[in-house]
Amino acid sequence: MSSPLESPVVGTIWKIEKEVGNAVSVGDVVMILESMKMEIPVEAEDAGVIEKIAVNEGDTVSEGDTLATIV
């Protein structure tokens, strides 16, 4: 079963820390958002492997947008 990793806020993808195929544990930082001049780490909510990254560095995202999929 896949699990979407969603944006917690409106912001810009500042840095992607993981790649497709990387294993992640709960709490691992997958990417960092910049919002209102603050860096916000987006952490894996489930353990698994990153199947897809749906954004690129520099992309603007809305709250609730799917950023990545973990299986």
Image (tube, rainbow, N blue to C red):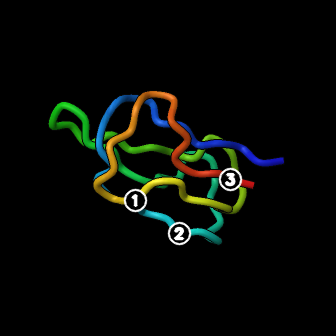
Label whose residue precedes the other's in the sequence (3 or 2): 2
Label whose residue precedes the other's in the sequence (1 or 3): 1
Disc 1 and disc 3 in contact, CB within 8 angstroms: no
- Indicate the position of residue 9 as horizontal and vertical percent values: 38, 29
Quadrant of the rendering where the C terminus is positioned: bottom right
Cα distance between the residues tagged 1 and 3: 17 Å
Residue type, label 2? Glu
| Residue occupied by mark 3 | 70
Residue type, label 3? Ile
Label whose residue precedes the other's in the sequence (2 or 1): 2
Residue type, label 1? Asn
Disc on res. 19:
2
Question: Of residues 15 and 52, which is closer to you in this image?
Answer: 52
| Residue displayed at 68% across by 53% down | 70
Q: In which quarter of the image is residue 35?
A: top left
* Number of disc labels: 3
Cα distance between the residues tagged 3 and 2: 11 Å
Residue 22 lies, with reference to residue 31, above or below; the image says: below
